[in-house]
Amino acid sequence: MEESPGREGHALTYSRPMANGILSMAERYRRPDWVRRLNAMAGSVGGDPRRLVALDGPELLAAAERSLDGALPRGDFGDPAWRHRITSLVRALDAAPLTVVGRLMTRQELLRGLRTRLLLTREIDAHPEIERERVGAPMIVTGPARSGTTILFELLSLDPALRAPLACEALHPLPRRAPGDASGERFAWSECEQEMWADVQPEFAAIHELRSDLPVECVTLTLPSFAGSHWMLIAAPGEGWSMDVGVNYDFERRILQVLQHGEPRTTWLLKTPAHLLTMEDLFAAFPDAWIVQTHRDPAKTIPSTVSTTAMVHWMRTEQVDAATLAQAILAGFAYGLNHSVELRTGGPFGDRFVDVRFDRLMRDPVAEVCQAYAAMGRELTAEHAERIRAYLRDKPKGKFGTHRYAPEDWGFTAEGLRADLKPYIDHFGVALED
């Protein structure tokens, strides 16, 4: 038996494992009563959550269009097939076994994404010069979960010369400023989504803190492309829809153009672990990007990635096949990490990578950031270094409990994971942990 600490001291006890050695999500986590009750309401209408929360592509699009106060956009934001894509996505999500709460969260994201896309398109219709904006040499953090990507992203975002998309502007890039208010209204709009994930499952806060004023990943920024990994992360949609990496990166470049238009020029700071799996496409979209790759023992990172993804799925469905999910994630990140060796040694972009080691980042963050900056020809200023020290000094440790995970929780062994990732470990000299 093992305790799983959650939000604000909440703790759960793991029960016995299933026959295959992997606990079901219901055995790992107890749903809050309000979530359990809302999901149970499906039973009162015949057992189908679709009767309570509808997901219908044309209806969602019409609702988003009605929400705009003004003329509808003329353009397509660089994607002529986007209406077909959203229709296919909604149909696939509607077929997925989502709960009542899962469908409600998903419906809100779809509507918000549609509204955002229409507003972005209308902005370019009104200001076509936006498409001439240059997104130059972004700094992009990537690496597997629990390898330091999030804390590094936050520390780099303290650099006045860098700009990371905050949750409030990623979720609501337009209007740029609410009437009479520079930021407060967008903070309020985004708070419902950022905080609700931990309300739906309190243990999520120990895995990843979401807040309106924190920088967010590219996954969140590109949700309105309806072609990116957000939708695979939350629900694994059914047949009829698939990701389109090229479309997603093109959307990301365009939304960055809108966000930076008319603002003082800075370098974009971006981040998501999923970039590891699509590095060639990333460089096709941002050929002069700097990639800051974090490294840590796969026996720590792979189980954490599985744990996080399984938790996100569990928020919206009762049907999480943890064993299949674990093997799919291992296959994906084993490819991405081992393939990064080839990119670094034989690819045309090998000199655009910078390495950050988890153990050194934890031991001396300022020194590790300093060496990464030096590799990119940047200087770590005294102001930035002091901001890093102050941020870490004031950042509560274990604020929402501890995210505990082990290879055996998900059907792995440390030895097996290290064998699968041997090319990666050997090439980068990744330190193995107890």
Image (cartoon, rainbow, N blue to C red):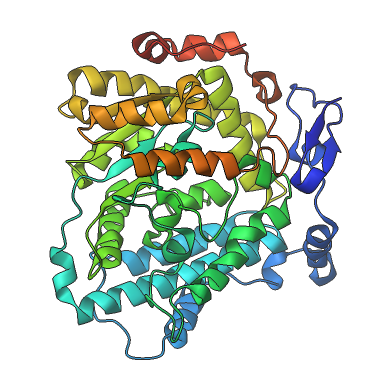
* 375, above or below 186, in the image: above
Q: Is residue 240 left or right of residue 327?
A: left
Q: Classify 199 as above or below 173.
A: above
* Image quadrant occupied by the C terminus: top right
Q: Residue furthest bottom?
A: 70
Residue 383 found in image quarter: top left
* Drawn side of residue 417 relative to residue 247, left or right: right
- Can see residue 239? no
| Residue drawn at 46 percent across, 73 percent down | 183
Q: Is residue 7 above or below residue 253?
A: above
**Which residue occupies the foreground of this view, 330 or 165?**
165
- Residue at horizontal 29 percent and vertical 58 percent from the top: 251
Residue ID at (37%, 52%):
164
- Quadrant of residue 300 in the image? top right
Report x, y in % for residue 246.
Answer: 27, 49
The residue at 28%/79% (across/down) is 122
In the depicted structure, whether residue 234 falls above or below residue 380:
below
Looking at the figure, which quarter contains the N terminus? top right
Foreground of the two, 85 or 68? 68
Along the viewing direction, whichever of 162 and 25 lies nearer the viewer: 162
The residue closer to the viewer here, 267 or 225, is 267
Q: Position of residue 228 (x, y in %)?
A: 40, 51
Residue 290 in the image: state x and y as whole percent: 25, 37
